[in-house]
Amino acid sequence: MDKEKIDEMYRKNAAMVYRYLCSLTQDTGLAEELTQETFFQAVKGIDRFRGECKISVWLCQIGKNLWYKELEKRGRHKTVELDAAIPSDENVEHQCLMRLEKVEVFRRMHDLDSVTREVMYLRLAGDLSFSDIASILGKTESWARVTYYRGKQKIMKGMRKWTED
């Protein structure tokens, strides 16, 4: 693969791969490292890409495998505090409420089973389509939609209880 095509692949997919890895790792620094390693591995193994899926899905799969290797190396999951990006033109009270709600949503997501949690992160933080999520996890698009819907229902149920307290 020539340098121009590599650059184009990186430009088109780096942000999405980074967001996906952020959703898995909950660590922006580690996500950056894994994103770079993902593209390094992709360039090394581009001859293994058979074109059976979008290149973005293939890249996310490489990133996911690198994340699993990192977890094995560490022997544990590492999480960091959620960095909330709230527009500055809103009032302080509204900003605080929005942050509390966002933190509570992610807290509720953390309580979901690992498969449902991964689907939720891929959809919300990774901004991936149900088709891409299904490809990454080796499932059907319908399965991804149903899993996301059920996870959302559990979170909403917990949020209703939280707001009533």
Image (spheres, rainbow, N blue to C red):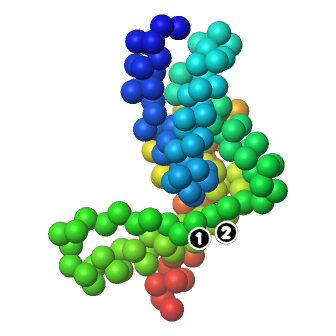
In this view of the protein, can residue 51 be seen by the observer? Answer: yes
Nearest the eye: 52 or 77: 77
Residue furthest left as drawn: 89
Residue furthest bottom as drawn: 165
- SS category of the residue bearing label 2: loop
Residue 60 in the image, given as x and y percentages of width and height: 59, 34
- SS category of the residue bearing label 1: helix
Residue 61 position by quadrant: top right
Residue 94 in the image, given as x and y percentages of width and height: 28, 79
Confirm or deny contact between disc 2 and disc 1 (CB under 8 A).
yes
Instruction: Judge left or right: residue 111 versus residue 163.
Output: right
Question: Quick one: label 2, few (<14), some, or many (20+) residues within 10 Å?
Answer: few
Is 101 situated above or below 71? below
Residue 145 in the image, given as x and y percentages of width and height: 57, 44
Instruction: Judge left or right: residue 32 versus residue 143.
Output: left
Which residue is pictured at 60% across the width and 34% down the height? 37
Q: How many marks?
A: 2
Disc 1 designates what residue?
Answer: 108
Q: Inspect the image, locate mark 1, and give the three-letter code of the amino acid beneath it.
A: Arg
Which residue is pictured at 58% across the width and 19% down the height? 43
Which residue is pictured at 22% across the width and 68% down the height? 88
Nearest the eye: 162 or 53: 53
Is 144 situated above or below 41? below
Give residue 71's mark: none
Disc 2 designates what residue?
Answer: 111
Label 2 to label 1, Cα distance in Å? Answer: 5 Å
Which residue is pictured at 48% across the width and 7% down the height? 2
Q: Inspect the image, locate mark 2, and give the three-letter code of the amino acid beneath it.
A: Asp
